[in-house]
Image: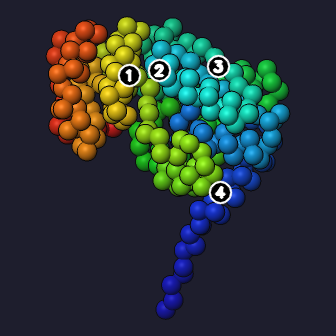
């Protein structure tokens, strides 16, 4: 009897595989949000392909806060990349606005179609995006849109998960290596509640206020007149210590009741 060993690639080997996958694509548009995944994808693409063979595509719509847009713009400029900021039009799509369980599919489809327009304008061959292997185990309807449109996910091809992406980002001194995960503001609205620009704005200013108090990883879930604040367990005390000023601010913005979810941060709806 004998056992057959299973070869496990090292992080460096996966990194080299990632670079090869991107190098083989030759000319790309990188769908860029300024988060951990897309920042590493952009950096590696810039290193491998050079400035003239890639464009960073930044989708702009009200569920993407201004602070995140500014951060994304700053990063692409620091990496010396050509970039385009494009209005992506989700708020004109009734399928997106009705906010059913396929919301992320409709959103991603808009984003990637606009990215493909940029690819055609610059005569670039492919659009690539930053999904990783952890996303394969989660409910990600947006990935279906990517598959349908022929969008490429190099991290999945290289077998890289989120933890490995953070490690590589730190190794390459990319400042987003420890950035908290961010999902668009529409994920704060429960399925079945129609998405409106004024709701997105209410969530945005509420989260921005709390972040200014030193609590970076926060979600303000919208339940009509009720704001349900989610933070990680180790930051709940910060919320409670500042509960009066938080409540006053969020009530001024438009909520009537302010709550703290004692379960802590949960996955988006």
Q: Secondary structure at mark 1?
A: helix
Q: Secondary structure at mark 4?
A: helix
Q: Nearer the viewer, mark 1 or mark 4?
A: 1
Q: Residue at x 56, y 52 (%)?
A: 170
Residue 213 visible here: yes
Residue 153 visible here: no
Q: CB of mark 1 within 8 Å of CB of mark 2?
A: yes
Give the CA separation, mark 4 to mark 2: 31 Å
Foreground pick, 89 / 176: 176
The residue at which mark 2 appears reads as: 65
The residue at which mark 3 appears reads as: 85
Give the CA separation, mark 1 to mark 3: 22 Å
Using residue 3 as the reference point, say whether residue 220 is left or right of it.
Answer: left
Spot occupied by residue 193 in the image (x, y as percentages of width and height): 30, 15
Q: Secondary structure at mark 2?
A: loop
Q: Secondary structure at mark 3?
A: strand
Mark 3 surroundings within 10 Å by alpha-carbon count, few (fewer than 14), some (14 through 19), many (20 or more)? some
Using residue 100 as the reference point, say whether residue 161 is left or right of it.
Answer: right
Using residue 135 as the reference point, say whether residue 80 is left or right of it.
Answer: right
The residue at which mark 1 appears reads as: 208
Mark linked to residue 15: 4
Reply above or below: 42 against 66: below
């Amino acid at each position: 009897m004998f056992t057959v060993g299973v070869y496990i690639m090292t992080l460096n080997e996966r990194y080299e595989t990632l670079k090869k996958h991107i190098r083989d694509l030759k000319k790309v548009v990188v769908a860029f949000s300024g988060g951990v995944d897309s920042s590493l994808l952009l950096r590696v693409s810039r290193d491998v392909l050079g400035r003239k063979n890639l464009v960073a595509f930044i989708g702009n719509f009200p569920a993407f806060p201004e602070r995140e847009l500014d951060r994304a713009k700053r990063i692409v400029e620091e990496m010396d990349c050509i970039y385009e900021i494009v209005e992506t039009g989700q708020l004109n799509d009734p399928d997106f606005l009705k906010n059913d369980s396929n919301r992320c599919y409709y959103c991603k489809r808009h984003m990637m179609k606009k990215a493909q327009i940029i690819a055609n304008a610059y005569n670039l061959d492919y659009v690539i995006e930053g999904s990783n292997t952890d996303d394969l185990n989660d409910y990600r309807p947006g990935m279906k849109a990517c598959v349908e449109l022929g969008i490429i996910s190099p991290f999945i091809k290289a077998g890289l998960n989120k933890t490995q992406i953070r490690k590589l980002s730190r190794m390459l001194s990319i400042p987003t290596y420890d950035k908290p995960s961010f999902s668009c503001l529409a994920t704060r609205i429960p399925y079945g509640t129609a998405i409106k620009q004024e709701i997105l704005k209410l969530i945005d200013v509420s989260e921005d206020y709390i972040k200014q108090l030193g609590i970076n990883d926060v979600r303000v879930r919208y339940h009509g007149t009720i704001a349900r604040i989610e933070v990680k367990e180790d930051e709940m005390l910060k919320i409670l210590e500042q509960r009066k000023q938080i409540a006053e601010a969020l009530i001024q913005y438009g909520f009537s009741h302010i709550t703290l979810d004692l379960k802590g941060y949960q996955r988006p709806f």
